[in-house]
Image: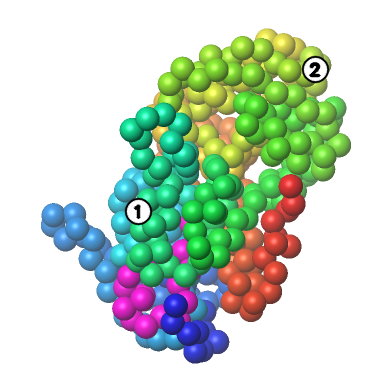
């Protein structure tokens, strides 16, 4: 790692989520670097940074959201560009961390994709990673560089508390999310329930039963992401069948792949809270409400630059 020889923070955005990058830059109080990120006719990525970054503390804001592979390679090339321009320190700011679901060999002859992402980021010159609600938090151990893992919980909880939901019960749509759900329930003073499910494939699940009492209660379903929305919409349906009243879906990452929007529009949820870690485009669910994490990410960048605690932003689990 080159030495940070100036007090300058430099922010640069890839093309994955420019709106989020601009919002972060506004909260930090500095403009994004002047750079060209484009494609050659054969779709190879072409990058040119017009500002001097020598010795600067640089932050590349680029979630690896769909199209995942394009955004991943663009992040690597942005980091390499900064390294070759003598940046002092390079931090990959990945509010959404793609390939996090493949964090281990769960069967024979499969890759550990999350490890490949980690290896390539470090090889490209990244000195630090800042991300939010990894699907598998143990991915931090794939790195021998600092990883700051933020949680969306404080921002989402603030909105839930504003809603003043009466007689709430927090529900996780699978047993793996119990820790997250318990953290929400503790702050909200709510009970906890679990929807027990069996996964048939990457896009299909079969719900078995509900563990806990949801009859006559207002339900808050919490999860880290919505991809195809199969799990969370099936959970909402089963909860209604078990007597749940109003349902609020509360997730960090709204990826909204394939039939997600159609499923969410058809599900019985009264509202769908998601953060802005992913761009949504024009195809979004009808009852969507976006909670911005730009202020939190901006504060984390400032704290990292100033060598202050980042754990104060974690929200605690």
SS type, badge 2:
loop
Residue 142, how many percent across, how many down? Answer: 49, 54
47 versus 221 height, above or below: below
Residue 85, how many percent across, how many down? Answer: 33, 81
| Rendered residue at 55%/17% (across/down) | 198
Name, please, the residue furthest toward the left.
41
- Asked if the residue at tag 1 contacts the one at tag 2, i.e. Cβ–Cβ closer than 8 Å, the answer is no
205 relative to 222 in the view: left or right? left
78 relative to 250 in the view: left or right? left
User: Tag on residue 54?
Assistant: none
Q: Which residues are magenta?
A: 79-95
Q: Nearer the viewer, residue 10 or 177?
A: 177
Residue 300, how many percent across, how many down? Answer: 62, 66
289 versus 296 height, above or below: above
Residue 80 colored in magenta in the image: yes
Residue 20 appears in the figure? no
Q: Residues within 10 Å of mark 2 (few under 14, many from 20)?
A: some
| Rendered residue at 83%/32% (across/down) | 190
| Rendered residue at 64%/19% (across/down) | 196
- C-alpha separation, residue under disc 2 versus residue under disc 1: 43 Å
Residue 81 appears in the figure? yes
SS type, badge 1:
helix
- Which quadrant holds the N terminus? bottom left
> Splitting the image into 4 quarters, where does residue 251 fall?
top right
User: Tag on residue 71?
Assistant: 1
Pointer 2: what residue?
A: 213
């Amino acid at each position: 790692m080159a030495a940070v020889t100036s007090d300058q923070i430099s922010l640069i955005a890839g093309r994955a989520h420019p709106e989020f990058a601009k919002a972060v830059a506004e909260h930090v109080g500095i403009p994004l670097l002047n750079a060209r990120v484009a494609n050659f006719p054969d779709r190879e990525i072409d990058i040119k940074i017009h500002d001097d970054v020598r010795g600067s503390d640089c932050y590349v804001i680029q979630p690896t959201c769909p199209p995942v592979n394009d955004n991943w390679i663009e992040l690597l090339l942005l980091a390499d560009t900064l390294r070759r321009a003598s940046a002092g320190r390079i931090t990959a700011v990945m509010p959404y961390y793609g390939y996090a679901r493949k964090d281990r060999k769960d069967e024979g002859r499969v890759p550990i994709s999350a490890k490949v992402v980690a290896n390539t980021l470090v090889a490209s010159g990244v000195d630090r990673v800042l991300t939010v609600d990894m699907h598998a938090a143990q991915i931090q151990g794939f790195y021998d560089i600092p990883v700051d893992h933020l949680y969306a919980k404080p921002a989402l909880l603030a909105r839930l508390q504003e809603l003043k939901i009466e007689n709430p019960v927090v529900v996780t749509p699978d047993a793996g999310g119990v820790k997250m759900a318990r953290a929400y329930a503790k702050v909200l003073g709510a009970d906890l329930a679990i929807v027990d499910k069996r996964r048939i494939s990457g896009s299909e699940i079969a719900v078995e039963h509900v563990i806990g009492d949801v009859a006559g209660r207002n339900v808050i379903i919490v999860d880290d992401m919505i991809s195809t929305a199969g799990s969370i919409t099936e959970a909402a349906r089963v909860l209604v069948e078990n007597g749940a009243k109003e349902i609020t879906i509360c997730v960090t990452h709204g990826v909204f792949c394939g039939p997600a929007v159609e499923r969410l529009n058809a599900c019985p949820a009264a509202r769908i809270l998601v953060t802005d870690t992913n761009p949504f485009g024009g195809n979004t669910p009808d009852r969507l409400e976006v909670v911005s994490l730009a202020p939190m990410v901006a504060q984390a960048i400032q704290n990292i630059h100033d060598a202050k605690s980042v754990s104060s932003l974690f929200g605690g689990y």
